[in-house]
Structure formats: structure tokens, C-alpha cells
Amino acid sequence: MKGIPISALLGLFFTVLYFAAAILAPWIAPYGMSEIVGDVWEPASTQFWLGTDNLGRDLLTRLIYGGRNTIFVASMATALSFSLGAILGFSAAVYGGWVDQALARFNDLVMSIPTLIFALVVLSVMPVTLTVLILVMGLLDSTRVFRLSRAVAVDINVMDYVEAARLRGEGQRWVIFREILPNALSPLVAELGLRFIFAILFISTLSFLGLGIQPPEADWGGIVKENREGIVYGIPAALWPAVAIVTLSISVNLVADWVLNRTTSLKGGRGA
Amino acid sequence: MPDPLLTINNLRIEATIYAPGEKPRDAMIVDDVSLTLEKGKVLGLIGESGAGKSTIGLSALAYGRGGIRLTGGTITLNGREIRLADAATLRSLRGREVTYVAQSAAAAFNPAKKLMEQVTEATLHHGLVSKSEAEARAVELFRTLSLPDPETFGDRYPHQVSGGQLQRAMTAMALCPHPDLVIFDEPTTALDVTTQIDVLAAIKSAITRTGVAAMYITHDLAVVAQVSDDIMVLRNGQMVECGSVQRIIEDPREEYTQALISVRRIDHKEKKPTDTPLMTVENISARYGAMGVDVLSDVSVELYPGQTLALVGESGSGKSTMARVITGLLPPRVGQITFDGKPLPGALKDRSREELRQLQMIYQMADVAMNPRQTVATIIGRPLEFYFGLRGRERDKRVQELLDAIELGEGFADRYPAELSGGQKQRVCIARALAAKPKMIICDEVTSALDPLVADGILKLLLNLQAREGVAYLFITHDIATVRAIADSIAVMYQGKVQRYGVKSTVLAPPFDDYTDLLLSSVPEMELGWLERVLEHRKMESAGN
């Protein structure tokens, strides 16, 4: 752990904390997820650390389970958007010609439709399950990743070492995964941090609008939605998920920054 | 003796190095260098890259580039100490008493402004003369520097003039405020030899006519010998030797200086062509895209097994296009390449793996020719895996053999390219090419980006490898000295055509055609008065015509 800057340590701590809480939810949550344990909107006490929600469920428990859903969906969607976007983007750059044109123009077409509206339309006609949510978010987000990776790969594709690999007779797979990918990693990692956060915001927005994760399952956007009326009466229940979203966003980006610094070092990511 | 213009005493320059994976540390860039420069004299600073010559040049402006700190010693200009001077003092002397000519004029000019505005900018900024007077000065300088249409030259934009003209315009910019001292930082390095000689002559006559003092920074001893009065040889931030041009050239005392002077004197006897050529290029014409102009037209050359064919010419002559055609990156429009007795398919994708293996390539910039995220073992090992299916220990053993062959030895296999010096990088690229056991290697300006001594080592290595492995080289270069050192036959290229072709002894011997004569006579030679002699000779010839 030596040589890690304090900001990265802080980010790492919170990121690990949130992910651990998400994974271990059933063991660490004080109550059951949809168990009604007290009165409506009870204030924080030793019994309910963050108080209770609009139905009298323990808010901390809801937050932990909500984080589990939110983080899971966001991670899967980000993973999907990255693998799809990066592979298609690199391929477009490497093959060039009409393959590139077809992929890039289709991508432009999809990007021209506002993401949220697109998602709302699709989700209103499809059954809202976790798989559908992940697919919709991942596919929509992959357009951004496609753009970035294509732009980065076009630059790398004209380097002499890529030409050397071509002259050797290497196939496109080697060129994409061994020559281009390692050199495109830095901007992609930076984008990964950002995209993950956007995915969290996106799923939270969808849930807030009622088209995301469905009750009684918890998720951060949903908790805000359920408790938003409480704000009028000075009940902070709706603010806690917001705090969670903010701290996770900042932490993940602090970690991404640090990884970025490491990978931009010329020595192939060996240095600190 | 009059007071010197510039005195530098025990100058020490340091910088903080942020090496990845290490703690930042201070490094000495220039260590205890002293020099004096009198009015109207020219001092040449010479050394390899990293010798600190540019840093010393800029210290005359009390300027340190990118985190460089002038930490010790004194810099006295016109009788006052400037190393610790405040910003206002420095502002008043920079661009007025001392001016600077950068290496790459193309990058140093603002493309959005006309030349006149930029040439007179410093003069007007310091309020030295009125606008019309400054412009009159500029026109006069354009004339001195023999720029075309001096009256209207200033109305052009930087992209409307050639590289050599731009470099001269920058010299005009430096001379316009009538400074006491001009720092020339490698002003001709990026130019072709035929252009370099004109720029050199222009700079020299401008220096003589204006009586300005100058520091001339370069890595080419032959160039500096033409313009300087004194030469200081630098290495690793320290002075090796300093003296008059004549003394340094004719009687170098230090071993390092002697090495610099004897560089490129490799004696290479040409081999006679054998019966069957390894590669025959017949009537090749090629063009890029749908452009209506042939970049190569009707080129025919032959390369014999185990020999070297040098393609010589200035930038834009089609040398590198030739390499692209032979490697299959640019299929020819017409013409045929025969390799090892069989016709070679024009396009890369139609060639078999065996055909690809026989023909390898080494690039000019070793930096970008190697994937920065692969270790040396991967870089050299991949062709072994790819062509011969070697894996594991067998592969590692062969990698080490290749590393030995390029004289690098143990401990290099696990390094990344960033952990190698320029010469070592180029050696690794050579090893990568050799790993395929090719019959022919295309060397595209492989020594141009290297310091002379390092380049010499690479050339010797290439010759040794040729003797041992019997590989043929197609050697692309603009440098005649390199050609002399390595070639068996030569093709001189000009505007996409082969101007002159044959074995080395006939190509480099008179009678010459006009272009070859111009090219050969433009190569600076390490002797005093060479520039004047060539110019005089040319003037007589053009008067005779």
C-alpha cells in the first residue's frame, strides 16, 4: 500500500466499503429488507441508526440493499457498455472503410436520440426486469464508449509498431488486443470511472421515475422517490441515498484518477 | 582586450527529474561550464543530445526550459549579472539584446499571422524604432538572407514559404532588433542538405554583415566548422574541450573530440553484383489514393543477395514510398516486383506468411516502432513465435541469442522500450527484424534520429550482421556519408524518379548529372572554408552557363 496518494486511499476505502456492503448485505443489514420494524419516519436512534422510512422500514437496511441493487446494475451495465463499445470502436478503427462508416454512422444515429427518453420509451414497452435494465443501459452507454475508443484507436492504428505488426502478418485480433488495447487503456480507464457514475445516476433516475428497479426491491433512486414527501416535514430520509451516491461517485473517480496516473507512466504501468 | 559581450562563469544548471517509480531527484544538467564571447564572434556549441548545449544556449537569456533551474555561477551580459536578475530586467533584454532562433521554424511561427508582423514583433514591442522603420529593416534583412521578392516576402503566411525560407525568416526575426547576441539552436538540422547549404550561407553572410555575436548550437561538427570562430565540445553537461575552429578540427586533444571528427569514416569495400538478384523492381509507378500524380514513376532497381542498395534523396523524393510499395502497404499502379525468383504480390494481404518473413523492416523512429507496453522479450519473441512457433524456454534462449547478436547482452529482456536509450532501441528493432531470419531488410532512415557516434555503432552492427547472416539491405537515407559507409550500389532519387543508379564507385564518381552534383557538393565537409569554396564554385558555374 506504499506510495498510494492519500486521495486514492480515501477513495479506495469508500469504494471497498460500498462494494463490501453490497456484497455482504444479507449478513450485515440489521433488519430484513422489507421488514416493517417501527413507526413511519422515526428519527435516528440507537435502534435505527438512520431512522425509518415512509413505511416504517429501517432506512440503513434499505440503503444497504439499495446499494446492492444499484451497484450491481451499474457495474453490469458499465461492463457491457465497455466490452461492446471498446471492441466495436477498435474494430471500426482497425478495419476502416465501409465497416467503420457503417458502425460510426449508426452510432451517431443512436446518439442523436436523448438517452433518457430512449430508455423511457423502451422500458415502458418491455417488462422491467434486471436483465432488461442492464441491457438497455449498457447498450445506450456503449455508444459513448464506442466514440472514445474509436477516436483513440484511430490514432494508435497509424503508429509504426502497429504497421510493423501488420507487416509481420498478424491478424486483426492480435492488432486489437495486443497492440492497440494496452495503449488505449489510460483514456478508457478514465472513461470507466466516469461511465460507472453515470450508470449509477441513470439507474437512480429511472427508479425515481418508476421505471427502474421495482418495489419492494430497494434501490437508491427508489428510496429517494419513496421518501421525497418527507423533506417537506424536515425528514432527512430522502437525503441519505443522495449522500451515498455522491460519496461513491467521488470515491470511484479518485481511484480511477490514481489508476490513470499509474497507467500513463511510460514504463507500461510498472511505476507508481 | 575589450570587455567581452557575454561571460559565463562556473554555470551550474539543475532540474528535478520525475522518473516513474522513483522518488523525484535533482539532476545536474550543466556542471561547471565557463565561456566568454566577444562582440562579433561566433561560438559553436557541439555535442550529442543530452549534452546540455541548448540549455547553455538558453542560459544566455537567463532562461531555463521546463523546470530547469540555473542554480549556480554567473552569467554576465554587457557588464551586468543576469542569472538572478528580476523579471523586468530580463524582459527588457530578451528579444532586444539577445535573440533566439529555434530548430523547427515551422513549429515556431504562428500560422495565423503574416511573416512581417512576426519578424518585426520584438522590435516594435521594445519600442526600438517606428513601424515603418522596422519593416524597412526586415526587408533589408530578407535581402541579405537572399529570400525571394524581399519587398513582398513579409506579406506571406508561414505555410506559403518553404522550410528553408522559413528558417531564414526566423533568422531575420532574430536580427531585426539589432541584438548583440543571437542564439542559433540547430537551425539547419531539420533541413535537406541541398537546402541546408543555402540557409547556412545566408546565416553566415548575415552574421558577417551585421557584426552580431552568435552562439551556434548543433550536433554536426562539419556545419559548425563553417560558421564559427571558436568551438566548445560538450558532453553530459560538461565541457570536453574548447578552442579555435582550426585547432579543434586539425588537432583535437580529447579522445571524445577525435571520435566526433572521425565519425562516419567506416571503410566499406563494395561487393560486385552476383548473377541473380534477390529482388528486382521493374518499372514501378505508384500514387496515393486517387491523386493524379505519380509519387513514384517508372522505378527499376535490383538488389543482390547479401548486399546493400542505398536509396538516396531529399525529402519528397519518393524514397519512403518505395519502401511502402516493396512491403506491400501501397500496391503499385504498374510494374512488378520479383523476390527470390518469384513475382511478389502487390498488396500485403495477398502475400503468404513465408513471403512476409523474408522481408523485414526497420524504422527511422525506434521510439514509435516498438509497442511501449511490451517488454523487449515480447517484442523480439513475437516474430519467433509467429513464424517459427517457438515457445517457452526455447523462445527465451533464442531471444537471448538475438540480444547477444545486437551486442546488448543480459538483463535487457525484461525492460520496456522507455527504459532503453535511443541507440539501444534501434538495436532492439534490428533484433526484431533479424528474429524472422529474413533475406532482406528495409532500413528506413535508421540512423537519422541518432547521435553521430551512436549511429556509427548501428552502421557497424548492420555491416557485421550482413557479413554473418548474409542478409541484404535496402537502405533508405538522405545522408551521403552513411551511404559511403554502407552501400554496395546506389540509386539517387529525385521527384519520384531514379536519377542515377549503379554500383557505388561509379555513382559517386564524376561525371555527375546536375542533381547528383548538387546533392554531393552540398554535404558539409569537415574542413575550414568548405562553404565558401562550394559557393564560389557554384557561382562560377552559373556564370559560365
Image (tube, coloured by chain):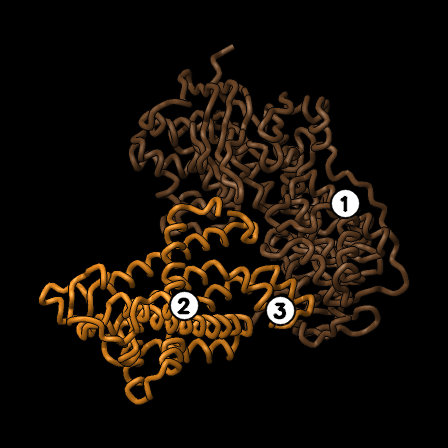
Chain colours: A orange, B brown
Name which quarter of the figure residue B219 lies in: top right
Label 2 CA crowd tier, 10 Å (few <14, some 14–19, many 20+): some
To which quarter of the image does residue B337 belong? bottom right
| Residue that badge 3 annotates | A174
The amino acid beneath tag 2 is Ile
| Nearest to the observer: residue B308 or residue A167 | A167
Q: CA distance from mark 2 to mark 3?
A: 36 Å
* Closer-to-camera residue (B272/A193): A193
Q: Nearer the viewer, mark 1 or mark 2?
A: 2
Residue depicted at 55% across the width and 71% down the height = A94
The chain holding disc 2 is A
Mark 2 and mark 3 lie on one chain; the one further toward the N terminus is 2
Mark 1 vs mark 3, CA separation in Å: 30 Å
Q: Position of residue B76 (x, y in %)?
A: 44, 19
Are the residues flagged by discs 2 and 3 from a single subunit? yes
Name the element at disc 1. Answer: loop
Q: Position of residue B287 (x, y in %)?
A: 61, 69
Q: Nearer the viewer, residue B450 or B316?
A: B450
Q: Is residue B144 above or below residue A115?
A: above
Horizontal side, residue A29 vs residue B316: left or right: left
Name the secondary structure under disc 3: helix
Residue positioned 85% across, 49% down in the render: B270
Numbered circle sitting on residue B244: none
To which chain does the residue with label 3 belong?
A: A
